[in-house]
Image: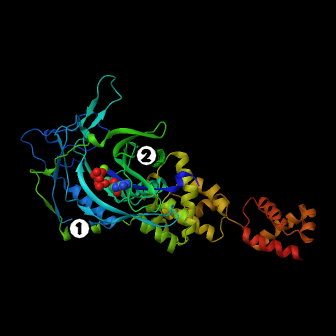
Amino acid sequence: MSVYDKYQAVIGLEIHAQLSTKSKAYASDSATFGDLPNTNISPVTLGHPGTLPVLNEKNIEFAVKLGLAVGATIRENNEFARKNYFYADLPKGYQITQDKTPICTGGFITLFPNTAKEKKIEITRIHMEEDAGKSIHDQDPFNTLVDLNRAGVPLVEIVSEPQISSAEEAYEYVTQVRKLLRYLEICDGNMEEGSLRCDANVSVMLKGASKFGERTETKNMNSIRNVKRAIEHEIIRQIDVLENGGKIEMETRSFNAVDGTTFTMRSKEEAHDYRYFPEPDLQPVIVSQNYINDVKTTLPTLPNELYKVYTKEFGLSEYDANLIIESKPLGIYYNELTQYTKNYKAASNWLNGSIKSYLNENGITIENFVIKPAKIAALIQLIDDGKVSNTVASQHIFPIMVKQPELEPLAIAEQNNLIQESNDDDLSSYIEQVIENNPKEIERFRNGEQQLIGFLMGQLMKTSKGKADPKKANSLLREKLKQ
Ligand code: ADP
Ligand code: MG
């Protein structure tokens, strides 16, 4: 047993998600990402004297959506607070946030199915706040540049309970949160662009201990994979410190993606006193039960629910179901497809197989895929009716459909002479040819080498140029060979 096995990790994540609203949280300037620096800033964002913030109602709607999706309790009486600190990218000198009255409390994220067994991670709170501007350190060798377009962009902060026990679980947690945000269409979830950010609180303790160890908080991971790497590193580092007789100090650390390590950013002594006080310029917002009910009606089917339907009712494998729910547009396509065919498994195979390969090879997203689900369902029907084989469908018909999506699969099959031959006369003539051309193998088969049926079927398919109905041909061939 290595020393690392003596310890268990305790992890709690804080996720900041930028809400995809058109305008900012408390001002009308555009919240668009990627515009020219400092073009989307108004006097309200800059906090000029005499300006007043006005709450963007979408913030409430999006936060309530998220709360409902995780099963949180939604607060009726929401107040805002000022979190004061001085920094170059914070022109007002404070952020408007929700200190004591987070809009959502409780609820959970389910980790599955990539973890061995389903595990629920409880949510401590979800609150609304605004983003600060962006300090850019790497464009000018002598100065830090500041882009205030991001100042005032609405965020929700999602704080988890310290119930995550490994870097893998943390990976899964962030993946699930991001998927949920995307299904709800309230955040684009892009970690590279910073619209989703994750701070990892990590501590370690001896297995079975009742008291948590001291934690560190690591920032600046720009992908889910890097969240995992940072936590992996931090767990090992903390155990090494403890094993060498040291002590973990509460501190904020930063992740270095180049070598996968973390380093001290600021220690507890440097921690801010934010001097929270109620925001005097914003009235409390009352979120009524009626409002919550209205928002509830706008919730889409959530990925976890889809997963259950696909695995339990449609009989898909966990793997296939997971591939489909990975992104909402894929799920939408699949749902539509299954309105036209009850062969759910074939529908999933087509989507996860030929269709995805085609999309990947051509750099197209499913939203821009030209073949309508009804046409794919018709193709599946052709196969199920024994009119064409899977191979002919995927290698000959599908490529034509992609070029001429208005054509019916049956018409394509007929025009190109691809209809499978399943009438006995045709098949018998192929069988005769196979028997004639492979006397040695026939002899051996009749002498007991049953496995040669595979070879003989291969010959038969070749002779028929792939058009023989393999099931029927197989049984006819076996019958013939018995004689
Ligand atoms: P702060 O605002 O100072 O960051 P919070 O109480 O909001 O403090 O906690 C932040 C995060 O730290 C939460 O996700 C929580 O689950 C996590 N956390 C708290 N204690 C520990 C611990 N001992 N080990 C790991 N994570 C912890
Ligand atoms: Mg924190």
Q: Which residue is mark 2?
A: 223
Image location (x, y in percent) of residue 390: 65, 62
Image location (x, y in percent) of residue 380: 58, 66
Q: Which residue is mark 1?
A: 292
Image location (x, y in percent) of residue 467: 72, 63
Residue 422 in sight in this render: no
Rendered image coloring scheme: rainbow
Q: Quadrant of the C terminus?
A: bottom right
Q: Quadrant of the N terminus?
A: bottom right
Q: Secondary structure at mark 2?
A: loop
Query: What number of labels is visible?
Result: 2
Q: Quadrant of residue 246?
A: top left
Q: Secondary structure at mark 1?
A: helix
Answer with mark 1 or mark 2, whichever residue precedes in sequence: 2
Looking at the image, which residue sits at the far left? Answer: 50
Residue 7 in sight in this render: yes
Residue at horizontal 13 percent and vertical 51 percent from the top: 277
Foreground disc of the pair 1, 2 = 2
Amino acid type at circle 1 is Ile
Amino acid type at circle 2 is Ser
**Residue nearest the observer in this picture, 214 or 245:** 245
The 10 Å Cα crowd at callout 2, few under 14, some 14 to 19, many 20 or more, is many
**Residue nearest the observer in this picture, 455 or 175:** 175
Residue at horizontal 45 percent and vertical 53 percent from the top: 171
Q: Is residue 155 above or below residue 180?
A: above
Q: Quadrant of residue 292?
A: bottom left
Residue at horizontal 31 percent and vertical 61 percent from the top: 124
